[in-house]
Amino acid sequence: MKRRYKLCVIFEILFSHWFSSSAGLIVANRALLSVRPREIELAPLGQIRVSDSILMYRDSFAAERSKMAKAIWGGKTIAESNATVVVEGNQYFPPDAVQKKFLKPSNHTTICPWKGTAHYYHVEVDGMQNDNAAWYYPEPKPAAAEIKDRIAFWKGVRVEV
């Protein structure tokens, strides 16, 4: 059986493998939204899959167990855990690893085509507020089930590993 791959797909896989190997963990590759299922054939060991016209790694998630990850903003540690899940370069902290006193509910939501609807928190430290700086997926799509209720940060919240 002849196997064909688009050059960009091969590059993405090799680069991701090299990066993850050198970093000591496997990180999720971003979804390639422009790939149509008819354009590639799958790797023999099922390393990749095509689903809803989105190419993703079968093992999209990796629990980072060996290193402590910390989310810091305003001089305070907002979250700390050695059991985060890495997706698209973001550390998703378990809910019990996040200090909820620094999170204030937000009405803001966004939609990811493969993860689902993200809900947001404002991060508030010592009277300073960082709007919509944390997000989570209360009801993720099946492809993102591993990050259900886990919290990730952006907008100036520094995450150290």
Image (tube, rainbow, N blue to C red):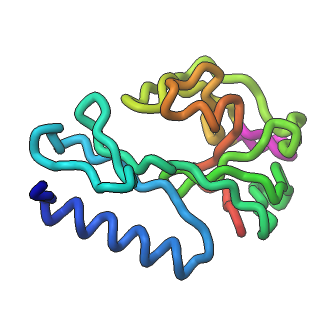
x, y percent for residue 13? 33, 65
Q: Residue at x 75, y 56 (%)?
A: 71
Quadrant of the rendering where the N terminus is positioned? bottom left
On the image, which quarter does residue 6 sit in?
Answer: bottom left
Q: Nearer the viewer, residue 159 or 97?
A: 97
Task: Name above or below for residue 139 compared with residue 1.
Answer: above
Residue lying farthest bottom? 22
What residue range appears in magenta? Answer: 123-129
Residue 127 among those drawn in magenta: yes
x, y percent for residue 59? 50, 50
Task: Name above or below for residue 125 compared with residue 144.
Answer: below
Q: Residue at x 84, y 39 (%)?
A: 102
Q: Residue at x 78, y 56 (%)?
A: 74
61 with respect to 69 (left or right): left
17 with respect to 21 (left or right): left
Residue 145 among those drawn in magenta: no
x, y percent for residue 140? 56, 25
x, y percent for residue 111? 43, 25
Q: Nearer the viewer, residue 140 or 80?
A: 140
> Magenta-highlighted stretch: main secondary structure?
strand
Q: Residue at x 35, y 50 (%)?
A: 48
